[in-house]
Amino acid sequence: MPSSISPADQVKQVWTSDDDTMAKQTATTRWPKIVQGTIDDVRQTAAQSSCAAQQEERFAIQSALKEMKDEMLQNKTLSRLPADGGGDIEGYNTRLAYLGDKVTWNAAPWLFCECYLYRRIQTIFARSRHWQTYDVFKRQKDSTFAKSRAAVEELASRYMHIITDSSLAADGVTDDEAKKLLFVEMTEIALWGNATDLSLLSNLSLEQIQSLQGREAIAKSQRNIVDNDTDQVWMYLMHTPRSSRRIDIVLDNAGFEFFTDVLYASYLLESGLASSIRFHVKDFPWFVSDVTPADVDSLFSHLQSPEIFPNREYLDRLLRRLSKHFDSGALTVIQHPFWTAGCSFHKMHSQAPDLVEDLKASSLIIFKGDLNYRKLVKDGLWPHTTPFKDALGPLGAKSGLKILALRTNKADVCVGIDSQSRVDALYEEAPQGAWIRNGKYAVVSFSDGE
């Protein structure tokens, strides 16, 4: 009788106690610095506040944050989360009870523990009186985006040159190969959007994209994409009815990356590859830089500022186009509490069945970034040659979900490599697993859900 236990049930998740992993390095080095950064941010905001009650309450907030940092440094047991009105607290505490008292900051499942860290930070602010809606990472997000001025202005110029080309407007590109190459170029911009250094991108006009030189430039830029299903995605889109093609994008980072996501969404609409696009954002500040509803407003506020972006010609034209997309409802922003749950996406059917049914109606679900990828594949230490669809578990074969993951590799997990010889070559090219951790390699992984 065949076993009812699937490979996804058996795969080992990365733990913060695993030697020679990014998980261990992150838990021992990065997390305490992140919490200290929140303490410093609260101090700075309180010093600038004119509200005496807010200034006074910051001491309790800083104390709670310092307590968490001390627990990390002393490798204490993870404590239960206090109720803060959120419906997800029970889920976190149930998982803590299941894991038991032996689970500490430096000996816990990395994915759960990292989610727990940010959910615990949120409880501290949510339970306060004068800091409930405060984003302790906003200052950092805004500062980082402001520093990307040159990249934003360059990309806006490039995009407007391509998108307003008369041969592209109204489906004017008749050369299927040119259409495909443009899709590849725009997808790569979305893929590498967390790096404001655009040197990895081919920097081409539409005419250049269609040339031999353009094809060679794109091929070169794809060398570091270790699992590249771009061709399969393109073929899928070409054979999908266009009358009502909804695409969902589960976002990752705010700032420049979100800017590239908005450009990508605009391109998908302008080219006819999508009829509507929904951006999925987080309910509250998450993993330092994830997009919240406030970050959407902040992006456009920044883009409209001549003080931050003085070169207005292309940005103003771009903003008018984007405003039309939002005003018409072609671009929308939605939320769901499951995106900040402490579990992998393998639990989506049991924890958020409404979300599963909603996503089944989507023509394509694009998951951006490293955390979403880790959640998609259960943060599991799969053999690197495991097919992406297999690692998706219940979200893979026969799920009905069309999933595209755009992720630069910054963790301990990566699947979809086509052969063991390719894996061996990658370890030789980037020793000690650097190719799965340093952000210089990436995946464009697709599952058709069939």
Image: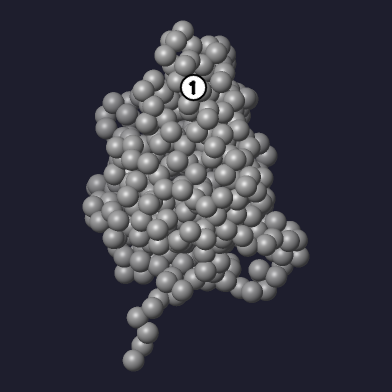
Relative side of 74 to 88, left or right: right
Give whichever of 228, 351 is nearer the camera: 351
Q: Residues within 10 Å of mark 1 (few under 14, many from 20)?
A: many
Instruction: Say above or below: 170 vs 413.
Output: above
Q: Is residue 134 above or below residue 403?
A: above
To which quarter of the image does residue 130 belong? top left
Residue drawn 45% across the image and 20% down it: 57
Q: Is residue 168 left or right of residue 23?
A: left
In the image, is 314 to the left or to the right of 201?
left
Q: Residue furthest top?
A: 50
Instruction: Name which residue type carries label 1.
Output: Arg
Q: Camera-side residue: 59 or 309?
A: 59
**x, y (%) of residue 444?**
52, 55
**Which x, y percent locates residue 435?**
67, 57
Which residue position is annotated with label 1?
A: 58
Q: Residue 104: give x, y in percent of width and height.
A: 55, 55
Q: Nearer the viewer, residue 125 or 339?
A: 125
Please give the name of the residue rendered at 65% of the width and 58% of the height, measured from the top-left corner.
21
Residue 356 appears in the picture as rendered: no
Quadrant of the snapshot with the C terminus? bottom left
Quadrant, the N terminus = bottom left
- In the displayed structure, 107 sits above or below 148; it is below
x 62%, y 25%: residue: 147
Dot 1 falls on a residue whose secondary structure is helix
Q: Quadrant of residue 284?
A: top left
Give how far across and how far down residue 302 sits, in percent.
49, 20
